[in-house]
């Protein structure tokens, strides 16, 4: 992290000082934003100081006024929560010979000190994707100093990483510290070890896949700034290893996060760069599917349909060479459900429900988190068709599963459906669902 980040411990102070505003100046702008809305605000320098030192939290109205001042969408305020929606850092690390270790160290330091979390801006992420699409690795991965790291050590670390990923879904909710420790060990060997080019490539690949897994863990738990920094480090490591498909997959994860955070336009831009260098048909299929989801969120039906067609075509052509590990789970069930999700966003409710039902029924039992998410989509499609009782039963099933396996992101999806059940307490299953949501 840059030195300014180490000195400025709160994202509000970071965002304020980037604009050369004093605390009284920010307070004045908040009062002006309130006046534009016909409101009055009592925010002063002392209140801003309390927010920046963590002695007080701004209420919802104050956050919306702050969002007005910083030109941030209210959707981002609701999706990210305080203080993670605040404008973030505009600079990513340049892809270069030693950038992987720096990016990984930065991500690890932020996992330790949550006060210093500052998310990347959409422009920064798009620029990073463009860098990746245009640049090749700079130098061999041989390192001639430090203690010797042989292939046996790397093999042991690879086995440990595979074991972490093989744990049942219910157990993976507890993996955060284990993944962090594993990534720290790998990063230390890359930085301080002595190894051949072949071992160096394996170490960087392992760092990329571990950081990618750790990023998904943080993303699922709503820690979006931490997730984006881990994906940032993962991309630098994949680039150093020269693994185009892995890099494309990591970019697609960042794009998926942007769609989740209601910025599908940025997601499309990132995915276009990722698609340009992806090689395996299965990787291309998944990237096209995520691009379709972003287009659907934008209401761009023609572009969505083209991307869905490409996703199916690439998937059907994926024969012979095994797919990369990061997308080996991608199957026809994902294409069916995500196509249904796209149609739901585009207003084609009946066909959407058919595809979501079909895909969910084919999902392997081991993919419990995905099943919970798919059931939430199914509940939304049932709401759209007016089947409130069935929607309540399906949402109840999804929420029960999400609570058992520790899937906060899925719980958030279900909570977003609750306004659709308002005023429908007399419908079978609705009171029980509302009570379960309150307890979550």
Image (tube, rainbow, N blue to C red):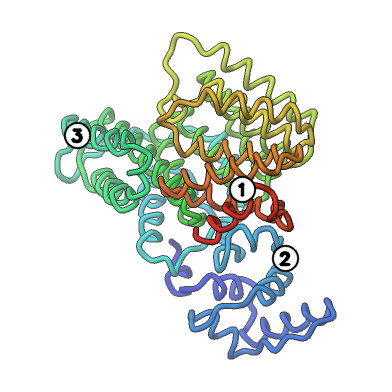
Gap in angstroms between the C-alphas marked 3 and 1: 50 Å
Which residue occupies the foreground of this view, 135 or 173? Answer: 173
Q: Tag 1: Cα neighbours inside 10 Å, few (<14), some, or many (≥20)?
A: some
Res. 255 in view: no
Q: Which residue is mark 2?
A: 71
Q: Which residue is mark 3?
A: 156
Looking at the image, residue 47 sits to the left or right of residue 32; the answer is left
In contact (CB < 8 Å): disc 3 and disc 1: no
Which residue is depicted at the point 56% across and 11% down? Answer: 317
Q: Which residue is mark 1?
A: 429
Which residue is depicted at the point 45% across and 63% down? Answer: 2
Gap in angstroms between the C-alphas marked 2 and 1: 41 Å
Res. 150 in view: yes
In the rendered structure, which disc, 3 or 1, sits on the residue that comes first in sequence? 3
Which residue is depicted at the point 40% across and 36% down? Answer: 240
Q: Secondary structure at mark 2?
A: loop
Q: Tag 3: Cα neighbours inside 10 Å, few (<14), some, or many (≥20)?
A: few
In the rendered structure, which disc, 2 or 1, sits on the residue that comes first in sequence? 2
Gap in angstroms between the C-alphas marked 2 and 3: 49 Å
Query: How many discs appear?
Result: 3
In the image, residue 303 above or below residue 299: above
Q: Quadrant of residue 303?
A: top right
Of labels 3 and 1, the one closer to you = 1
Q: Secondary structure at mark 1?
A: loop
Q: Quadrant of the N terminus?
A: bottom left
What x and y, as percent, mark residue 348? Answer: 78, 32
Q: Tag 2: Cα neighbours inside 10 Å, few (<14), some, or many (≥20)?
A: few
Looking at the image, residue 333 sits to the left or right of residue 72; the answer is left
What x and y, as percent, mark residue 403? Answer: 45, 50
Which residue occupies the foreground of this view, 342 or 273? Answer: 342
Which residue occupies the foreground of this view, 268 or 356? Answer: 356
In contact (CB < 8 Å): disc 2 and disc 1: no
């Amino acid at each position: 992290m840059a030195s300014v980040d180490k000195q400025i411990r709160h994202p509000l102070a970071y965002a304020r000082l980037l604009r050369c505003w004093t605390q009284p100046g920010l307070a004045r702008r908040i009062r002006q934003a309130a006046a534009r809305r016909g409101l009055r605000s009592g925010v002063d320098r002392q209140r801003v100081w309390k927010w920046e030192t963590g002695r007080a939290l701004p209420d919802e109205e104050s956050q919306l006024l702050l969002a007005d001042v910083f030109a941030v969408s209210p959707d981002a305020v609701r999706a990210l929560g305080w203080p993670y929606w605040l404008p973030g850092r505009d600079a990513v690390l340049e892809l270069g010979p030693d950038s992987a270790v720096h990016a990984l160290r930065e991500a690890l330091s932020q996992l330790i000190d949550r006060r210093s979390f500052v998310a990347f801006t959409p422009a920064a992420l798009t620029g990073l994707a463009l860098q990746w699409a245009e640049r090749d690795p700079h130098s061999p991965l041989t390192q001639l100093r430090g203690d010797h790291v042989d292939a046996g050590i790397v093999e042991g670390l690879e086995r440990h990483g595979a074991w972490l990923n093989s744990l049942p879904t219910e157990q993976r909710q507890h993996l955060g510290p284990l993944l962090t420790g594993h990534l720290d060990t790998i990063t230390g060997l890359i930085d301080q070890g002595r190894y051949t080019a072949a071992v160096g490539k394996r170490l960087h690949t392992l760092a990329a896949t571990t950081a990618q897994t750790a990023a998904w863990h943080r993303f699922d738990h709503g820690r979006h700034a931490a997730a984006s920094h881990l994906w940032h480090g993962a991309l630098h490591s994949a680039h150093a290893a020269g693994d185009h498909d892995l890099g494309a997959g990591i970019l697609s994860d960042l794009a998926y996060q942007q769609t989740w955070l209601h910025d599908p336009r940025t997601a499309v831009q990132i995915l276009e760069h990722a698609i340009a260098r992806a090689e395996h048909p299965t990787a291309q299929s998944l990237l096209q599917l995520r691009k379709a989801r972003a287009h659907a969120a934008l209401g761009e039906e023609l572009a969505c349909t083209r991307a869905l067609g490409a996703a199916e075509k690439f998937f059907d052509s994926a024969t012979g060479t095994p797919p990369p590990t990061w997308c080996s789970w991608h199957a026809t069930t994902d294409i069916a459900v995500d196509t249904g999700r796209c149609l739901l966003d585009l207003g084609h409710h009946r066909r959407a429900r058919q595809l979501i039902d079909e895909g969910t029924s084919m999902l392997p039992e081991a993919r419990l988190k995905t099943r919970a998410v798919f059931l939430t989509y199914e509940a939304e499609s049932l709401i759209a068709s007016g089947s409130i009782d069935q929607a309540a039963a399906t949402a109840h099933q999804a929420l029960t599963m999400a609570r058992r396996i520790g899937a906060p992101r899925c719980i958030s999806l279900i909570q977003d459906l609750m306004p659709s059940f308002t005023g429908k307490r007399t419908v079978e299953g609705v009171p029980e669902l509302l009570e379960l949501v309150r307890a979550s």
